[in-house]
Amino acid sequence: MSAPYPDAMNAIQVENLSKSYGDVRALDGVSFAVPAGTTLGLLGGNGAGKTTTIAMLLGLLVPTSGQITVLGHDMAKDRFEALARMNFSSPYVALPSRLTVRENMRVYGHLYNVAKLDQRIAVLARELDLGEILDRPAGQLSAGQKTRVALAKALINRPELLLLDEPTASLDPDTGDLVRSWLEQYRAESGCTILLASHNMAEVERLCSDVVMLKKGRVVDRGSPDQLLARYGRHDLEAVFLDIARDRRQASDT
Amino acid sequence: MRSMFRRIWGLMYRHLALYRRSWPRLLELAYWPVLNMCIWGFTSSFLRARMGNPAVMAGATLLGGVLLWEVTLRSQMGMSISFLEEMWSRNLGHVFVSPLRPFEMVLALVGMSIIRMLLGTMPAILLAWAFYAFNLFTLGPVLVLFFMNLMIMGWAVALGVVSLILRHGAGAEPLAWGLLFGLAPFSAVFYPVSVLPTYIRPIAYALPTTHVFEGMRGALLHGEIRWDHLAAAFALNIVWLGGAALLFARQFHRARVSGALISIGE
């Protein structure tokens, strides 16, 4: 683990973040913080601004206004310092399909300057059960195997911050559960901070200590899963999500 | 510094791993240069047989032009197609959120361009020597300077192509194959600049490639090294490469503003 960041409390600090494409406002004054070592769920319907937020946290997208600090680094000024200490996984971004799993791991191990790379690959292969597929081309893997490989790539540099965009999308319940267990295990062992965008409410309830609800580019609510359930008088986050998405009901304290 | 070289190597390793296992990919690199050499080699043999001695030097400059033009073309394509391969594999999203700096990505593409150019042109150079009695290496050490200038020009055009792809997405892909050919008529590859109409010559002299080909003819036909042309080629390459680097930096930033980096390749 590298040196701690100055503001040891928050791994991510987002202040008044906005993004416009011409007249379209994709994100409008979003602010939130993610304390180090916690898992934040970013929830919202399609077009709510989750992907835009993650893209800006990764430096792929420049905000129209606002400030992002990740692991103590201002993303507008020194994003590469932060990027070396974080990682990202999404089923919508592929790894080179003709390279084997091992070759993909080696590519990203070099890009993230991982020490003792072969050992690290061996550890990840054991933990994520990749041993039998290490020398198979990534393009020939099943959806579940691809997800495990994507997760291995995301863990290759022992990230202090992990950004996950729908990590269990299109997985069967068994594989999805395994992935969630691995994430819990990694967080417990490493103290890693996780930001998770997901449409799987059960996953969010299980993994996240805090949830930010986005709608039309704005934060419409925030709290722990228990707080949100109590506030909306619901038994599961899916019902809360639908209440917010369909404007059916206001939270009791808003 | 070590981590920078490791990141550059990481991206190069990604491409080299593909070539290691795929002989069709290796074959493709040399296929067009060798085919070109066969066509122009037989053409120069025919001219030599019909016209005798006067055609010998003409044939030599023709084959020299073919080989050196391949150096520029393969350097350009080696760089822009390596970038396209990242795009086609939908891998850029991972690459751009890694600690790899944009200039490091460019250096990795330059590295791949050199390897691809050498693998592509060496068989054609050997073919010219073995079958058409044309040894490019008789140009002497100045050949290295010719190669350098032609490669730099190829990289400048490739950076322009990558910039256009960042700006216009997949619609700009065909430029990776065709853009450089647009400069060939002005580069005086097979004929001296004096053949061109007077009003076109300033365009020709603004291209580093023109000075290399004029220099090549000077070496082959008169046995002289035209340092003036070489100096002009280096100076122009600084301008071309600098301009292309600025364009790339600008388009990369614009792609981060417009969100093009998220959807590139889709």
Image (cartoon, grey):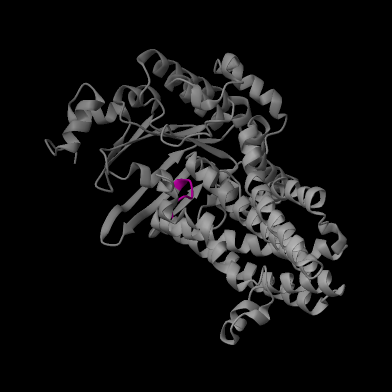
As displayed, is residue B254 above or below residue B233?
above
Q: Nearer the viewer, residue A50 or B29?
A: B29
As displayed, is residue B160 above or below residue A138?
below
Horizontal relation, residue B218 to residue B105: left or right: right
Horizontal relation, residue B223 to residue A233: left or right: right
Q: Quadrant of residue A153?
A: top right
Say whether residue A59 is magenta: yes
Residue A198 visible, this angle = yes
**Looking at the image, which residue sits at the far left?**
A248
The span shown in magenta is A57-62
Q: Position of residue A15 (x, y in %)?
A: 40, 52
Q: Nearer the viewer, residue B54 or B211?
A: B54
Q: Quadrant of residue B148?
A: bottom right
Q: Position of residue A144 (x, y in %)?
A: 44, 20
Q: Nearer the viewer, residue A163 or B148?
A: B148
Q: Position of residue A172 (x, y in %)?
A: 36, 16
Q: Quadrant of the C terminus of chain B?
A: top left
